[in-house]
Each structure stands twice: as structure tokens, then as C-alpha cells.
Image: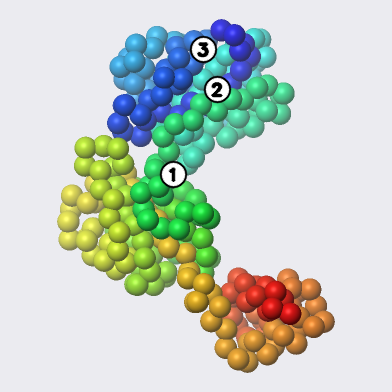
């Protein structure tokens, strides 16, 4: 192996095995060790491509305890590839502690790009893609999940979530309630697999569609939600504008916005966007 002592972060297919890149196959065939989230699951993938490298498990439950030993292996001049069950490692997957520790130790960390469900869904969604926020899986508990949605309710960028089949209905229903029934969204299910579905509509329409079709409640999901339109973000009433203008004459934008939010009860992010537009118009 020409790059001894290197940690490779290797993306694997999220469904369709044809998405496995030639580079990924070569790297996995050449490294001294493959650290895999689930060795049994990844074993099928490796067997399919005739890869016979040694594998060890590295998952969320043992990552912290295993990392020091893996770093020792890398420092001894061996090469390691890290893969997860599907897609790009560290994107709602384990691997953060390994990569961070390797970089802190001065070791080379090389990404081997490939499939990622969030990016694949975004590319086919037809929602604004120049700026987006990846939120991963929402919390499992309803109260915590709703709190996350509340904080993101007025986010201007496209929102991307993952969700499991066990909570897809609850999440869609809560999203409809909090983000608004008419908010544009896209539901991408089982990407690159036999029953791949990418459907757009309002949150109400998507929630009702999934609720009435049990087949759409199975598999792995990516939910994409259109950010708050600019017109809605800039909807500040005359009194709030008057307060904000007065405060901006005496205070920096962040302080003026914080105080205006307390006075008017409006959200800081809405006032902040409006304050920037006022400053720009001066």
C-alpha cells in the first residue's frame, strides 16, 4: 500500500450496488483493515465485490473504546478504511471520534466520496439547493422533536431530515402543525432501491398520502422542507419596524434585534433579516 498510515473514509452505496465507485473498491481491497459499523452487513457488500480485507466492528457503542487502538494501528504504518452500513460515514453515522482523533494525531484522513442520501434527495427534490440545513434524525421523543421543529420554523434555508419508518407518520404530522400545512416539502423514500419514491407536495398532502398508504410507511426516508419564503420573513408590522429603526440608530444590529424582539414579541431571526434589509437601504 503506497499510503501507509492513512485513514480512508469510504462512502458505500445506499441501495444500488452500481453506485460503488471503482476507487472505493480499490481502496477497500488494498487497506490493512476495514473498520465497519456492522461487519455482518458490510460483509455482504465486500463479498459482492470480492474484497477480502480484514474487518472489525466500529459503531456508536464501542467507538470511543476502540479508537485509541485504531490510532495505534495507523501510527504503526498500517492503513485503515472506515465504512458504515450505507452512504457517507459521519453523516448521521458513527466515525466522528475516529476521524477527529486521527487528525489530532497528525495522521492523514482521506475521503473517498460516494453516495449520500441527503444530497441525493436534494438533487432530485426541486427545492432551493443553494443553501440548505441538514438536521439528520429528529429526536425520538415527541416533546424534544417538536422543540427542534419550533426552533427551525422560520429557517430560510431548505431543511433536510432523515426519519425512520417507526416515526415517519408522527414526524410528518408534527411538521405539518409546526411548519404550516401549506409549506412545500418533498418526501424521498428508499433512494436508489427498487421502490424508490420521490414525491413533492405540501406537508398536509404528504402526511395524508403516507397515512393512507401503508406501503409508503416502509423503508428509509429523507424529508426536505422549503425554507420560509422571503416575503414571510420580511412581514414585519409598522410598529415593529418603528421600534427597530429607533434601536438601530443607537445600537449594533444584534443588540437592536434582541431588544426589539423583547419589545415586540417577534422572532429574532425575522427581525434580524429585516434589520439587515433596513441597514442595506440606508
Farthest residue in the bottom direction? 239
Which one is earlier in the sequence, the residue at label 3 or at label 1?
A: 3
| Residue at numbered disc 2 | 8
Farthest residue in the right direction? 250
Q: CA distance from mark 2 to mark 1?
A: 21 Å
Q: State which mark lies toward you, 2 or 1.
A: 1
**Residue 251 in view here:** yes
Mark 2, other Cα within 10 Å: few <14 / some 14–19 / many ≥20? many
The quadrant of the rendering that contains the N terminus is: top right
Q: How many labels, in total?
A: 3
**Residue 65 in view here:** no
Q: Quadrant of residue 274?
A: bottom right
Give the camera-side residue of 218 and 195: 195
The x and y percentages for residue 123 are: 40, 47
226 up-or-down from 265: above or below: above
SS at circle 3:
loop
The x and y percentages for residue 137 are: 44, 49
Q: Is residue 107 left or right of residue 19?
A: right
| Residue at numbered disc 1 | 119
Is there a contact, CB below 8 Å, between mark 3 and mark 1? no
Q: Is residue 266 left or right of residue 146?
A: right
Is there a contact, CB below 8 Å, between mark 3 and mark 2? yes
State the residue at coordinates (32%, 50%).
188
Residue 31: image tag: 3
Amino acid at each position: 500500500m503506497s499510503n501507509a498510515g492513512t485513514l480512508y473514509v469510504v462512502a458505500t452505496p445506499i441501495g444500488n450496488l452500481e453506485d460503488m465507485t471503482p476507487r472505493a473498491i480499490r481502496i477497500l481491497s488494498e487497506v490493512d483493515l476495514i473498520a465497519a459499523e456492522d461487519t455482518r452487513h458490510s460483509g455482504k457488500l465486500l463479498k459482492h465485490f470480492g474484497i477480502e480485507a480484514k474487518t472489525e466492528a466500529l459503531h456508536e457503542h464501542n467507538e470511543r473504546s476502540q479508537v485509541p487502538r485504531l490510532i495505534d494501528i495507523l501510527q504503526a504504518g498500517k492503513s485503515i478504511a472506515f465504512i458504515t452500513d450505507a452512504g457517507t460515514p459521519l453523516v448521521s453515522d458513527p466515525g466522528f471520534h475516529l476521524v477527529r482523533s486521527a487528525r489530532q494525531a497528525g495522521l492523514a484522513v482521506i475521503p473517498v466520496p460516494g453516495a449520500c442520501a441527503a444530497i441525493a434527495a436534494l438533487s432530485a427534490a426541486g427545492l432551493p439547493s443553494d443553501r440548505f440545513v441538514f438536521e439528520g434524525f429528529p429526536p425520538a421523543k415527541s416533546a424534544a422533536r417538536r422543540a427542534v421543529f419550533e426552533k427551525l420554523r422560520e429557517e430560510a434555508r431548505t431543511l433536510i431530515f432523515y426519519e425512520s419508518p417507526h416515526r415517519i407518520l408522527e414526524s410528518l404530522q408534527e411538521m405539518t402543525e409546526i411548519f404550516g400545512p401549506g409549506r412545500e416539502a418533498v418526501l424521498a423514500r428508499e433512494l436508489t432501491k427498487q421502490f424508490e419514491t420521490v414525491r413533492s407536495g405540501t406537508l398536509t398532502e404528504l402526511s395524508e398520502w403516507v397515512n393512507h398508504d401503508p406501503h409508503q410507511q416502509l423503508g428509509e426516508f429523507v424529508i426536505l422542507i422549503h425554507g420560509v419564503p422571503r416575503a414571510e420573513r420580511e412581514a414585519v408590522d409598522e410598529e415593529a419596524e418603528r421600534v427597530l429603526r429607533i434601536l438601530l440608530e443607537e445600537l449594533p444590529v444584534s443588540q437592536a434585534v434582541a431588544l426589539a424582539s423583547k419589545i415586540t414579541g417577534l422572532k429574532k431571526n425575522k427581525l434580524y433579516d429585516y434589520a439587515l434589509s433596513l441597514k442595506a437601504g440606508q
